[in-house]
Image (cartoon, rainbow, N blue to C red):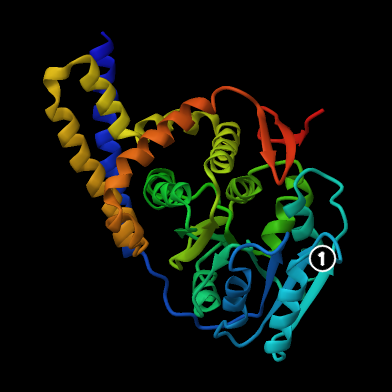
Amino acid sequence: MLALVLLGLVAGSLVYCVLTVIAAQNYCAARPEPAETFPPMSILKPLAGADLDLEENLRTFFEQKYPSFELLFAVRAPDDPAIPIVERLRTAFPAIPSRLIVTGEPPYPNAKVYSLERMFAAARYDLLVMADSDVRVTPDLLVTFAAEFQQPKSGLLTCPYRAVPGPSFWSKLEAIGLNTEFLSGVLVARLLDGMQFAVGPTIAARRETLADIGGFHVLKDYLAEDFVMGKLAAELGWRVILSSCIIEHHIGTQPFGANLKHRLRWNRSTRRSRPLGYIGQLFTHPLPLALLFCMVVPDWWPVLAVTAGFRALAARATAHRVLGDRLTPENWWLVPLQDAASFVLWLAAFFGNTILWRGRKYRLLRDGRFHPAA
C-alpha cells in the first residue's frame, strides 16, 4: 500500500513537471503590445539598513528610461545606514524627483507595509511601483509596466524574478530553488487558475486598486502582504498580471543557521496564507518522492532516473527559458541537494507557529496574520 501511494505521488509530480514546461511556454508566448501612452509613476522603496550592493540596486531605478517618474524612500530612523547611500544617488541624479521619508517605529507588525503606507500618502501619481531594497532592474521596467497597464481592467502587476545569490553556499542553494521550484509554482498557478495573488519583490498597482482593497491598512497584520494584496485585488475583479519584465532579486548571503530560519519563516508564512495550496506543494518535490519510492521498492530504481529527467526539463523551462539564469545550468548537480533541503523544510513548516524576522520573534495565526510573540 505504501509503495502504491508513493508511486501515485511520483506520477502526480511528473504531471506537475509537464505542466511546468507548458506553463513556461505559455508565459513566454504572452507579450504586451507596445505602450501608446506613458503615464507618470511613483516608485516606492522601503529601506532598512545598508543591504549588500544596495547602492547598485537603487541606482537601477534612477536610471529608468521613462519620461516622468519620481522616487520615494522610507526609513525608520534618521540614523539609518541607508540614508547616506540614498543621498549620494539623489546628488548624482538631480533631474530625478526624489524624496526621503523618516517614518518612525511602525505601529503594527508589518513594518514594510507601514513604510509603503507613508510613501503612498506622499506619492504624486496614480501608478505606483513597490520594490524591495534587494531588487535590481533593467532600464525598461517602467516602459514595460506602461504597456501592461494598457490591458483591460489591469489593476496590479507582479514580476517574476531571477534570484542572484551572495557568496555563501546556502545562498546559492536557495537561489536555485527560487529559480526552479518556486517559479514553477507561480507559472503553473497562472496556467491553471490565472493570477490570483502577487509575489513580493516588485509589484505595481493603480491607486484605485489599492483604494478598493482598503488601502495598506488592511495588510498591516499579514506577513505575506504581497500575496494578500494580489488576492484581494483579484477577488474584486481587477486583473492581476504576471509581468513580462524579469527583475533580479539579490538575496545576499547568510550562514547556514540564518538561511534555515529565513526559509522556514517563508514556508510557514506560505502554509498559512494558502493552506490547501501548501499541501499541494507536495507534488513540486519529484526527486524526493521518487527517492522514497525506490527506498521502498529498490528494484524500481528506473523510476528515479525517469523522474530526474522530468525534473531537469522542468528546471530548464523555468531557469533557462523564462529567467535566462546561468546559475542553475552551471550548478546543475546542486539541484537534487536543493530539492532534498526544500522537501525537509516543507515538512518542517507543518510544525510550529513562530518565526524570527529582523531579530524579533513573532507568532503566526491561522489566517496568515502575525503579531509579536510574548
Q: Looking at the image, which is closer to me, 192 or 353?
A: 353
Outermost residue on the top side: it is 1
Image side of residue 74 versus residue 50, left or right: right
Give percent across and percent down for residue 110. 75, 47
Near-viewer residue (248 or 122): 248
Residue 136: x and y in percent read: 54, 69
55 or 154: nearer the eye?
55
Labels in figure, total: 1
- Whether residue 223 appears in this view of the structure is yes
Question: Where is mark 1, residue-wise?
Answer: 121
State left or right for residue 291 relative to residue 363: left
- Split into 4 quadrants, where in the image is the C terminus? top right
Task: Tell me which corner region of the image, top left, top right, bottom left or bottom right, holds residue 351.
Answer: top right
Which residue lies at the image location 55% right of the left edge and 76% below the top edge? Answer: 142
Q: Is residue 306 left or right of residue 228?
A: left
Residue 119 in the image: above or below residue 216: below
Furthest-bottom residue in view?
A: 95
**Which quadrant of the figure contains the N terminus?**
top left
Q: Is residue 27 visible?
A: no
Relative horizontal placement of residue 15, taking residue 35 as reference (left or right): left
Q: Nearer the viewer, residue 146 or 223?
A: 223
Q: Is residue 300 above or below residue 246?
A: above
Circle 1: element type: helix
Picture quadrant of residue 115: bottom right
Q: What residue do we see at 42% from left, 75% from top?
A: 33
Question: Mark 1 Cα within 10 Å, few/some/many (few <14, many 20+)?
Answer: few
- Amino acid of disc 1: Ala
Residue 84: x, y in percent? 76, 75
**Is 7 above or below relative to 251?**
above
